[in-house]
Image (tube, grey):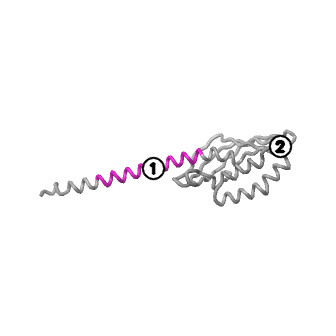
Amino acid sequence: MTRSRMLAPGAVLVAVILGVFAGVQAHLAASTADARADALDAAKTRVPVLLSYDKTTLDEDLDRARAQTTGSFADDYEKILTEVVEPTAKRRGISTKATVSAAGVVSGDRDEAVVLLFLTQNTTAKGNRSSVSGSRVEVTLKRTGDDWKIAGLKPV
């Protein structure tokens, strides 16, 4: 047997291994890209729910807001809602609506992502006082089952 005939099966084996490796890497990259897109969509949907409420439906709106969160952020957010947001909104008759102006993924993988959102928030209070403000927030999202929930929110 010549040397080239002996090397041929080894070369084929190396080619197969490299092909499988490339295929796995491509699948992982596509999976990560899909996860980042899903996390971005979730942030654009969940953050306005988290930051919006109406004085006439305050309890229901705050319950919906709570459902957007996960992990230790859920506990921290609950504390803010019960100690600050709810009593102030009731006392001053405050309603607020947050909308996403722009958004992009900062980083992410299949289980966690960080998204930057540019928000516009319209707020009204008793006496027809109103204000419009803009802000940027960095949102950390974590996969919970087949969905993404807010695990952190930080103004930037």
Q: Is residue 31 magenta?
A: yes
Q: Secondary structure at mark 1?
A: helix
Residue 119 vs residue 90, the one in the foreground:
90
Can you say whether 93 is above or below 14 in the image? above
Question: Looking at the image, which residue is at 17% across and 57% down?
Answer: 6
Query: Main SS of the magenta segment?
Result: helix
Label 1 crowd bin: few (<14), some (14–19), many (20+), radius 10 Å: some
Question: Looking at the image, which residue is at 66% across and 41% down?
Answer: 100
Label 2 crowd bin: few (<14), some (14–19), many (20+), radius 10 Å: some
Q: Is residue 110 left or right of residue 10?
A: right
Give the image quarter of residue 75: bottom right
Residue 129 vs residue 73, the one in the foreground:
73
Residue 34 vs residue 63, the one in the foreground:
63
Q: Is residue 22 magenta?
A: yes
> What residue does disc 2 label?
125
Q: Tag 2: residue type?
A: Ala
As measured in the structure, the alpha-carbon distance from the residue carrying label 2 to the one carrying label 1 is 48 Å
Question: Looking at the image, which residue is at 15% across and 57% down?
Answer: 3
Q: Which residues are magenta?
A: 15-41
Give the x, y percent position of residue 104: 58, 45
The numbered mark at residue 147 is none
